[in-house]
Image (cartoon, rainbow, N blue to C red):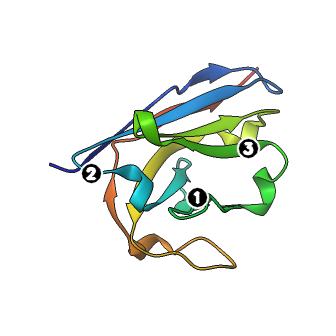
Amino acid sequence: QVQLVESGGGLVLPGGSLRLSCVASGFALEYYTIGWFRQAPGKGREGVSCISSSDGRTHYLDSVKGRFTISRDNAKNTVYLQMNSLKLEDTAVYYCAKSNAWYGSHCPTRPAFDSWGQGTQVTVSS
């Protein structure tokens, strides 16, 4: 059974850091594009970052470039999202998802992702 489980969310002050984890089971994560998405209250789900299966290339939403880093540990079947210099507007539920697609210039769009985790809440507040 394919499953993705996110963890690592929480409450953090502006300027703080969190590391989210996405643990996969039922499939080998290294063979798929893995994306991180987020959904803030009252807003649609947006892509934050993705990492390719083959060579670990990455893409980021413009607003998180330089602050967030996506990485993968194939031995642990886990993808991480290191989030630094967090801002109030980063508050959202964060989801990871897998896709068979990879586009060289940008992350696959949301419909290309076929399995999703349950999400983890990130709240940035003073």
Position above or below: 57 against 4: below
Residue 28's tag is none
Q: Which mark is residue 27?
A: 2
Considering depth in this image, is 126 or 115 the residue closer to the camera?
A: 115
Horizontal arrangement in the rendering, residue 87 relative to residue 22 (left or right): right
Give x and y (percent) for residue 47: 58, 61
Which mark, residue 68?
3
Q: Is residue 24 above or below residue 97?
A: above
Asked if the residue under mark 1 is in contact with the one under mark 3, i.e. CB atoms within 8 Å, the reply is no
Q: Element under label 3?
A: strand
Q: Residue at x 70, y 36 (%)?
A: 83
Whether the residues at callouts 2 and 1 have beta carbons within 8 Å, the answer is no
Give the crowd class for mark 3: few <14, some 14-19, many >=20 residues within 10 Å: many
Q: Give the number of the mark in front: 2 or 3.
A: 2
The x and y percentages for residue 35 are 51, 57
> Spatial distance from mark 3 to mark 1, Cα to Cα?
12 Å
Sequence order check: which comes first, mark 2 or mark 1? 2
Residue 43 versus residue 77: which sits nearer the camera? 77
Picture quadrant where residue 18 is located: top right
Find residue 51 and name its label: 1
- C-alpha gap between disc 2 and disc 1: 16 Å
Residue drawn at x 39%, y 72% as measured from the top left: 100
User: Residue 63's x, y, as percent?
Assistant: 79, 56
